[in-house]
Amino acid sequence: AFAIPGACVSIVPFGKGHINDTYLSRWRAEGAGGAREERYIHQRINDKVFRRPDQVMENIARVTSHLAEALRREGAGDVERRTLTVVPARTGESWHRDRGGGWWRTYLFIGGTRAEDRVESPAQARLLGAAIGRFQRMLADLPPPPLHETIPSFHDMRFRYRQLDDALAADAMGRARAVGPELEFFAANRKRGAALMEGLESGSLPPRICHNDAKLNNILLDEATGEALCVVDLDTVMPGTALFDFGDLVRTAASAASEDETDIERITFNVELYEALIRGYLPEAAGFLVPAETALLAEAGRNLAQIMGLRFLADYLAGDVYYKIGHASHNLDRCRNQIALVRSMDAARDEIDRITLSALARTRNA
Ligand code: ADP
Ligand code: GN1
Ligand code: MG
């Protein structure tokens, strides 16, 4: 269905995403210089999560062409490794529907890269911070119309609390009695968690195009150099606050453990990695961030960890209907992981504030 030359040699499941079905394929084409092998990524878009895959793809086509143009303008080499490239269907659309109604898309495979669940070093964290800042900066001048909102209320904490309340009331799996301490934690933090959405609603936080899923394993790292090469998983690129992305990166890249770690003792917030992230992010983002945004940078990681914890718990109670899971308690384990991370961030709050202020001062003086 897609405009790929040659013959398919193999196709295998790929990656560790929680939402879509991802495959890697190899193709062999005979050319003037002999046989050539090309690789592609194919994804079946999760249409339970994304109700309008056509709108998702319309967003992604606009965003990827805009990024490619911006990269070329800035003289970046290897543009096809620095942004996703959509391979159109033979119909000319950016998607293909199979006979069962499933929605598919194809990207060029970005080889020589890996997606990690933990950061290796402060130097790498700095490059990751810069990658997300750059991504936001390059999309700041995307011409109208606004992008489609592919998942409504995606990072709206109050909506996520309501989902938890509903899942708890229904208690579809009879799991509610086993999650008392987690429910207590979320009840105690209900008010504090609203800060980002309140800022967006009051207008103090300007709406911006953001990625909305800027976690560590959605950024491909160059195998050879460790460089943060390409931000992938663009399904949720839509309006939001820049803090959603900074926060998602902080919660995943400055945690000493991965999101799947179950040993609570090991889930600690690493302030050294946080410092590197923010020092990488600010030089790219300082040109557009307003004071109301910089004032909430220190809160962003905590906020995003809270919302992910809530979502994992709601899905656990609802019977694991949203996230892909590897074992029965996976969503509960992930929820506990995020709670431990919030606690560790709270314990480090003075240090986080100090590092944030000093990074802001450094950027202003640079
Ligand atoms: P999900 O929405 O399920 O998380 P992603 O779009 O993030 O799906 O893809 C899953 C994984 O596949 C990514 O984390 C990344 O490792 C890999 N991946 C996705 N697109 C590409 C690509 N074009 N080239 C190389 N790897 C990719
Ligand atoms: C999902 O698709 P993936 O695995 O990159 C989820 C994010 C969560 C993340 C938690 C569309 O991201 O919101 O932060 O899992 N994506 C969607 O790991 O819900
Ligand atoms: Mg992903």
Image (cartoon, rainbow, N blue to C red):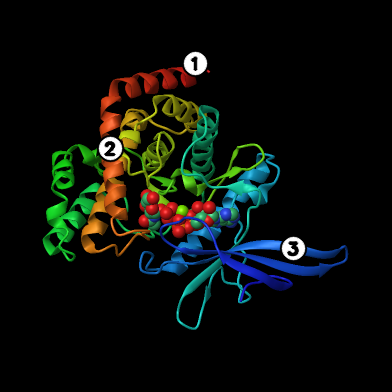
Look at the image and tell me whether residue 325 can be seen: yes
Do the residues bearing badges 2 and 1 touch, measured as CB atoms within 8 Å? no
Give the percent coordinates (x, y) of residue 139.
51, 46
Residue 365 disc label: 1
Q: Amino acid at mark 2?
A: Ala
Q: What element does badge 2 sit on? A: helix
Do the residues bearing badges 2 and 3 touch, measured as CB atoms within 8 Å? no
Q: Amino acid at mark 1?
A: Asn
Identity of the residue drawn at 14% across and 64% down: 170
Identity of the residue drawn at 82% across and 70% down: 30
Above or below — where is 245 with respect to 91?
above
Look at the image and tell me whether residue 146 can be seen: no
Give the percent coordinates (x, y) of residue 184.
13, 43
Q: Nearer the viewer, mark 2 or mark 3?
A: 2
Q: What element does badge 1 sit on? A: helix
Among numbered discs 2 and 3, the one appearing first in the sequence: 3
Residue at mark 3: C-beta within 8 A of ligand 1: no
Quadrant of the image occupied by residue 255: top left
Q: Nearer the viewer, mark 2 or mark 1?
A: 2
Among numbered discs 2 and 1, the one appearing first in the sequence: 2
Q: How many marks?
A: 3
Identity of the residue drawn at 41% across and 37% down: 246
Quadrant of the image occupied by residue 361: top left
Among numbered discs 1 and 3, the one appearing first in the sequence: 3
Q: Which residue is mark 2?
A: 340
Q: What element does badge 3 sit on? A: strand
Above or below — where is 102 with respect to 32?
below
Give the percent coordinates (x, y) of residue 61.
55, 60
Q: Which residue is mark 3?
A: 37
Distance, label 2 to label 1, CA atoms, is 36 Å
